[in-house]
Amino acid sequence: MSQSLTLSHPTGVLNGSIKLPASKSEANRALIISALSGQESQLHNLSEANDTQLLQRLLKSDAATIDAEDAGTVMRFLTAYYAITGQEKTLTGTERMCQRPIKVLVEALRELGASIAYLGEEGYPPLKIGKFTGNGKKQLKVRSDISSQYISALLMIAPLLPEGLELELEGKIGSRPYIEMTLSLMKHFGVEAIFEGNTITVAPQEYKAAEFTVESDWSAASYWYSLVALAKEADITLLGLKEHSYQGDHAIADIMYKLGVYTQFTEQGVKLMKKKHERHISLDFSDCPDLAQTIVALCAALGVHVDMTGLESLRIKETDRIQALQIEVLGMNCSLEEITPGVFTLEPGILHKQKLSFRTYQDHRMAMAFAPLALLEPVDIQEPSVVRKSYPRYWEDLQKVGFKVIMN
Ligand SMILES: O=C(O)C1=C[C@@H](OP(=O)(O)O)[C@@H](O)[C@H](O)C1
Ligand SMILES: C=C(OP(=O)(O)O)C(=O)O
């Protein structure tokens, strides 16, 4: 794969229907739950995202060492899965994965009777998972302000624990819609849970086999909203998106209403239309952290001033996304600063007419978020193959609506 690609659009006019990739978050929950059920469930429209293809392969693997690559859900969900099923595995990942914390999950699983050792730095992968000696403990307190994936991982194994689980979430609940997605998927496969205040209770129960069709990915849709916002004219339909979705990132429809895109829900999905955008907006990303890069890149291009909160988890994702964004918007004469603790402001500048070049930091969302700027000026994207994590056909889909893609 090439080191960079150059993207441009001759007319700035976008027309077409796009079949988005399926949600990797939904798919990876369905795969883990299906494996835990011990029965054959029919899962349709599993995502072509590497994160999902990888989990499918790993769940069938009897290798002693398992490589979760750069997939957070794969690392966190498999840690809980191997722990409860008592599979002795070494679980590792990319260099970056071994810098992404996992202590909260490991400590919780240990309290439940799992045997997990750190093979490198305490609190980080790689992990050595051993026998499960389920000690009958059912009440746990878990921090919920670092990653919701720890909570989702614990919830999915909860019905299989001898006494079930009563999970008290401590601190701010970050990425809450992902916890709700987990509970919804568990319910789809026959398991009830009660989420009251900050406590989630799951009694011992059995998962039941069921058919499940994974929805299109709302996080992937966000890049198409950005494309429409920056196009001269646009008539774009995104297939397979649902208004009432398990995915919290459907929030993009409301956010983009302020940034120049009107959403019409149809039988097939959504139709996106252009409208006027606001000049100054305030957003809290606590429920939808994966949308932050889309919004920052778009607002830098539109010259919109944004005040933002809820960005804490961005520092421990595929890269330090705050730092990556700060560097890349600087190249567009914009600044992204933490004004007071936890409050960030994007101050737009004047965009000079020049070819833009963006680094991607091994992060699919950096590539996908900055690519739409090619509607203004030709854009170079470094390491374009990063998109394989969630949206492998991204560059092909852009070509379908008239983008010129030159691999360098
Ligand atoms: O559970 C999930 O599928 C995800 C949860 C979120 O992570 P955090 O809970 O770490 O914020 C999100 O950023 C990630 O892309 C997918
Ligand atoms: C943060 C992400 O993924 P994960 O944490 O599952 O690696 C993402 O896809 O933006």
Image (tube, rainbow, N blue to C red):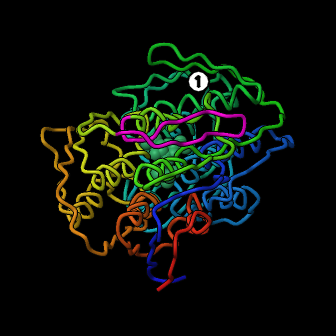
Residue, x 76% and y 30% (percent of image)?
A: 189
Q: For ligand 1, tell me if the residue under mark 1 lies within 8 Å.
A: no
Let me know if residue 239 appears in the view.
yes
Q: Looking at the rendering, which quadrant does residue 138 occupy?
A: top right
Query: Considering depth in this image, is 391 or 274 the residue closer to the camera?
Result: 274
Label 1 is placed on what type of residue? Leu
As drawn, 209 above or below 398: above
Query: Considering depth in this image, is 307 or 206 the residue closer to the camera?
Result: 307
As drawn, 369 above or below 307: below
Number of on-image labels: 1
The reply, left or right, for residue 327 in relation to residue 130 is left
The reply, left or right, for residue 160 in relation to residue 399 is right
Residue most toward the bottom? 408
x%, y% of residue 171? 34, 27
As drawn, 318 above or below 86: below
Q: Secondary structure at mark 1?
A: strand
Q: Circle 1 sits on which residue?
A: 165
Residue, x 73% and y 51% (percent of image)?
A: 46
As drawn, 116 above or below 3: above
Q: Looking at the rendering, which quadrant does residue 324 occupy?
A: bottom left
x%, y% of residue 129? 58, 53
x%, y% of residue 375? 41, 63
Q: Is-magenta flag for residue 98?
A: no
